[in-house]
Image (tube, helix red, strand yellow):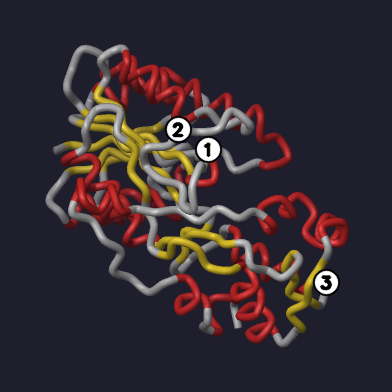
Amino acid sequence: MKVFVTGATGFVGSAVVRELLDAGHKVLGLARSDANAEALKAAGAEVHCGSLEDAESLRSGAAQADGVIHCAFIHDFANYGPAAEKDRVAIIALGEALAGSKRPLIVTSGTLLVERKGEFATEDEGSTSNFPRKSEDAATALAERGVHASVVRLPPSVHGDGDHGFVPMLGKIAKEKGAAAYVGDGSNRWPAVHRLDAARLYRLALEKASVGARYHAIGDAGVPFRQIAEVIGRRLKVAAVSKSVEEAAQHFGWMAMFAGIDGPASSAKTEAALGWRAQQPGLIQDIDRPEYFGL
């Protein structure tokens, strides 16, 4: 299968590209710069020049492929609303190129966007309307119009070598503030997955997904945030300390909401449907290494 991958040189997308190539698929990767193009060529993928904001480049890339995996997102939290809208428009453009065919489109969303009703967020539960990001709504709209669209939900921590997401950001804040903080007693939980496990799930979803299905990439169902802070504190040689909600807002800045959120999630139905199960190290084992924080 020839697969068009957006975000193909990103932290998750590059692992998806490697997983697809190793499984015998061909990859056409979206590249917005010469550096991205060179990275894709070095990996063994074909290059398609364009960007998330160029709808025509997305449509033409998807038109050349047997399936599409959409990993790209503009992670500009200072302008999250506009970034979310660009993502929605991009998904619709990709879907337009696949309309009238059975070629699959795998869209990326997050488990924190789930309107959780029980102990764990599940694949059966829909996304909340409280966040600007509407990736799932766009995928659902396409599926209702006959596009073979489905969703992979990622947890807040997708970890592994080269991580530049939330945990390294927490480490940077801890260095700057001289403390690794958690909110209250730190019992709020973060689900997590290793990037290589996530990449395998994308491939399986591409090969086996049902129209309109939602899949959860979950290795750890819920790691208490205090444990994350304690590893960061030990590795960076700063104290792990509790902060009130008010203090956390000052300590974490824009990350305060994520630091205090309780978002455990299950992947039981994904495992049953696709035969997927996390195999790589869990979050605490993975980050409890000096190299994770550049030491």
Q: Is residue 140 left or right of residue 234?
A: left
| The disc label shown at residue 115, or none | 1
Q: Is label 2 in a helix, a strand or a loop? A: loop
For marks 3 and 1 on the same chain, the one whose residue lies earlier in the sequence: 1
Image location (x, y in percent) of residue 198: 35, 55
Q: Residues within 10 Å of mark 3 (few under 14, many from 20)?
A: few
Mark 2 lies on residue = 126
Which residue shows up at 44% across the image and 61% down it?
A: 221
For marks 1 and 2 on the same chain, the one whose residue lies earlier in the sequence: 1
Q: Is residue 20 left or right of residue 199?
A: left
For marks 2 and 3 on the same chain, the one whose residue lies earlier in the sequence: 2
Residue positioned most to the front: 118
Q: Quadrant of residue 226?
A: bottom right
Q: Is label 3 in a helix, a strand or a loop? A: helix
Which residue shows up at 17% across the image and 41% down it?
A: 207
Amino acid type at circle 1 is Glu
Which residue shows up at 17% across the image and 22% down it?
A: 102
Q: Residues within 10 Å of mark 1 (few under 14, many from 20)?
A: some
For the residues labelled 2 and 3, the Cα–Cα distance comes to 37 Å
| The disc label shown at residue 177, or none | 3
Amino acid type at circle 3 is Lys
Q: Nearer the viewer, mark 2 or mark 3?
A: 2
Task: Name the image quarter holding the C terminus.
Answer: bottom right
